[in-house]
């Protein structure tokens, strides 16, 4: 399993339950959160990516030699032992028209 996959599933589940009307889009790669702003319905798109390297809050503004807090304190209260529902990928087969378009293109290119 990819690094952070379980954590991303946990966060996705929490976001979907927190924001009414939120849903998964783009084969589960995006979380869409609908919200009214100035009388207009907009969707805030959220994507989750596990960081390559862990940092501490404020590290981007840290003074050289400054001691920062331990990031493990931010995980308190999160239960990682509970399984998270697996998001299944859906395979979409090309239509007959799409297949014919590819054949026509290959023929036009002389391939």
Image: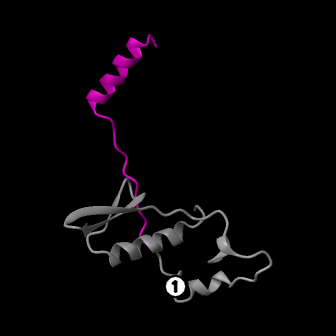
Measured as percent of width and height from the top left, residue 31 is found at 38, 63
Foreground pick, 57 / 26? 57
- Element under label 1? loop
Choose top left, top right, bottom left or bottom right for residue 107: top left
Where 89 sits versus 66, above or below?
above
Foreground pick, 78 / 37? 37
Choose top left, top right, bottom left or bottom right for residue 54: bottom right
The residue wearing badge 1 is: 78
Specify start and end residues of the magenta stretch as a single range. 84-111
Measured as percent of width and height from the top left, residue 77 is found at 52, 89
Q: Residue at x 78, y 74 (%)?
A: 64
Foreground pick, 90 / 32? 32
Find out whether residue 98 is within the magenta segment.
yes
Task: Give the quadrant of the N terminus.
Answer: bottom right
Whether residue 9 is visible here, answered yes or no, is: yes
Measured as percent of width and height from the top left, residue 30 is found at 40, 59
Q: Residue at x 26, y 70 (%)?
A: 21
Q: Residue furthest right?
A: 65
Find out whether residue 43 is within the magenta segment.
no
Q: Residue at x 53, y 66 (%)?
A: 5
Q: Residue furthest left?
A: 39
Please indicate whether residue 52 sits to the left or right of residue 111 in the image.
right
């Amino acid at each position: 399993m990819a690094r952070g996959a379980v954590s991303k599933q946990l966060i996705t589940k929490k976001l979907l339950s927190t924001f009414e009307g939120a849903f998964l889009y783009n084969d589960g790669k995006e979380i869409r959160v609908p919200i009214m702003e100035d009388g207009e319905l907009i969707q805030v798109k959220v994507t989750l990516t596990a960081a390559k390297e862990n940092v501490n809050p404020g590290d981007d503004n840290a003074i050289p030699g400054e001691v920062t807090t331990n990031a493990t304190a931010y995980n308190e209260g999160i239960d990682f032992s509970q399984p998270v529902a697996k998001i299944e990928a859906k395979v979409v087969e090309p239509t007959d028209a799409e297949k014919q378009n590819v054949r026509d293109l290959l023929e036009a290119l002389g391939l």
